[in-house]
Image (spheres, rainbow, N blue to C red):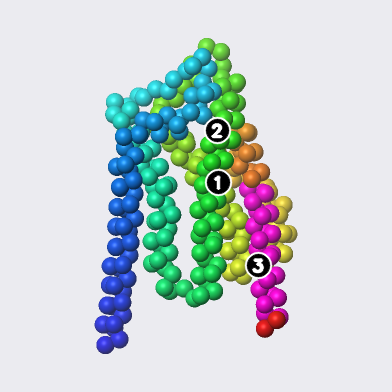
Amino acid sequence: MSGEILDESFISHLVELRTRLLRSIIAIGILFLCLMPWAKELYALLAQPLLAKLPNGGQMIATDVVGVFLVPMKVALMVAFLIALPYVLYQAWAFVAPGLYSHEKRLALPLVAMSVVLFFVGMAFAYFLVFPAVFAFMAKIAPEGVAWMTDIEKYLSFVLSTFIAFGVAFEVPIAVILLAKAGVVSVENLRKARPYVIVGAFIIAAVITPPDVVSQIMLAIPVCLLFEAGLFVAAAITKTEEQAENAG
């Protein structure tokens, strides 16, 4: 009897998971269909940081026959996913929340919301600050007689990898708070590890960013600052919990 109950509970969870996944996919699909007419404009907006730095009004190229169609569609799909991300995360939260304790919900919901905000901030930082600096640097070091341009597919790949790199890097405060909250590492030990974090930030930046000093520095420095911000918040949470325990 207990086995049958467990099986029914497992199946009901699978059905709910499928339902919430379908809702997320449908939401992304609807947004994608709405954005399709403006796919070219979205790609032009995405390419603006590079186009503004190409010498002599240079242009991008498409080496694939269907690239001029598929690449803008990919950009529209990416934008649709980003717009739908809060709804997708809500579906994930609605699936997971019933299994959490009340104190876990109080911590998890703000962290999830903040992680989304930080990811978008990381992407905006890359688009508005990193891209112009990197492309200006590349334009200056291009040898004489070399027509500096890029394929639209390769540019999209570069942009996506950079967005992900900076978006994930800006999640450092969330990681610090979770490590301290879970008791994996104390705040004091995290403070002692500060020199290693700084070195690690520059090493990771050198690995995941384009091979230029500008983008590496512009990723490593924010990571270090965000690590300090995470330490500050984690210390505040830990202190509040200790005061509550002492008061109790």
* Residues packed near mark 2 inside 10 Å, few (<14), some (14 to 19) or many (20 plus): many
Image quadrant assignment for residue 42: top left
Q: CA distance from mark 1 to mark 3?
A: 23 Å
Residue picked out by circle 1: 121
Image spot of residue 32 (x, y percent): 33, 43
Q: Residues within 10 Å of mark 1 (few under 14, many from 20)?
A: some
Residue holding disc 2: 131
**Which residue range is magenta in the image?**
223-246
- Of the two numbered discs 1 and 2 on the same chain, state the one appearing first in sequence: 1
Residue shown at 62% from the left, 33% from the top: 214
- Tell me the kind of residue under disc 3: Ile
Residue 156: quarter of image: top left
Q: Amino acid at mark 1?
A: Val
> Magenta stretch: residue 11 in it?
no
Q: Is residue 16 left or right of residue 89?
A: left
- Give the label on residue 237, or none: 3
Magenta region includes residue 227: yes
